[in-house]
Amino acid sequence: MSRESVSNRALGAYLGFACGDALGATVEFMSAKQIQKRYGEHRDMVGGGWLALDAGQVTDDTQMSLALGQAIIDHQGWNLRAVADNFLAWLDSEPPDVGNTCRRGILRYRDSGLLCGSPSEDEAGNGACMRNLPVVLATLNRPDLFELWSLQQSHITHHHPLSDAATLALGRMVSLLINGQGPDACLLEAERLIAVHAEFAYKPYPEKASGYIVDTVQTVLHYFFNSDSFESCLIATVNQGGDADTTGALAGMLAGARYGVEQIPPRWLERLDGVVVERIRRQVEELLRLAEIS
Ligand code: MN
Ligand code: MN
């Protein structure tokens, strides 16, 4: 597997993730019917939505990923406290959106120094899963480190077996794709997930796309496995509504890794926040460099 194709797919994953965030944020919390009524089909990065975003602006999904990635790069490896500190600095920067569970976990860290909350029934949201891509990139050739770092960063805010299982499964899928495997390898990974946690079964698709990790994963897998291009995967995913920026981001991550960066429509890449694009390009390079030496 050539180094160029690995970095191309890694960049596709991270930029695809940010595109899904920026595209989906416009229709976050709308139902599929409401989206259809208002947009016909939502397919352009126009901003707006309940957060009144600029066109191409990203939200917490991408910002928390960047915060996590930066902590890994700054410490040339894993430093959980640095990750939590970066989450806290991000929260202090008054971001446009913060999930409730993320806020609670970060404030718990601020107030008590705890890097891991107790397992909690109400922490089965998608907030830990959504931000894990930098860990995948930095541990591309180290499944043991991937698992450890993924769970540790997750438990700062989300400590729930379904969140853990989904974070690891989606992370493994994107790493398989980046390493040159096809969707069939991802299907096996999905089957493994469902064999342990039957909740995640997505056939027939239940058409729920909320921030509950089960709804999120079902939506992402359904549209990822039932589309044949980056663009059609993202459009179908976000038009399902619900937690559309997060389902869009995760679908964009998988599709970007599968199809490569050149399949991301130029009209989206050009509209995407340029500062974010630059940070992503640098992080991909530096995280992959770490993956090579670890
Ligand atoms: Mn968001
Ligand atoms: Mn969201």
Image: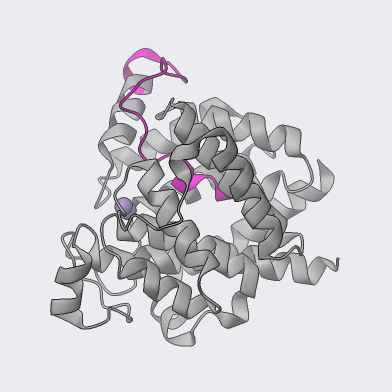
- Determine whether, in the image, residue 91 is placed left or right of residue 232: left
Give the extent of the magenta segment: 110-135
Tell me the quarter of the picture where residue 181 sits. Answer: bottom right
Residue at image coords 47%, 47%? 201
- Residue 199 location, x and y as percent? 43, 39
Tell me the quarter of the picture where residue 98 sits. Answer: top left
When the figure is inspected, residue 96 is found, relative to residue 163, above or below; the finding is below
- Residue 150 location, x and y as percent? 58, 35
- Residue 108 location, x and y as percent? 33, 20
Whether 239 is among the magenta residues is: no
- Determine whether, in the image, residue 124 is placed left or right of residue 196: left
When the figure is inspected, residue 291 is found, relative to residue 247, above or below; the finding is above
- Determine whether, in the image, residue 107 is placed left or right of residue 166: left
Residue in the foreground of this view, choosing between 282 and 121 = 121
Residue in the foreground of this view, choosing between 57 and 43 = 43
Residue in the foreground of this view, choosing between 130 and 187 = 187
Dominant secondary structure (helix, strand or loop) of the stretch shown in magenta: loop
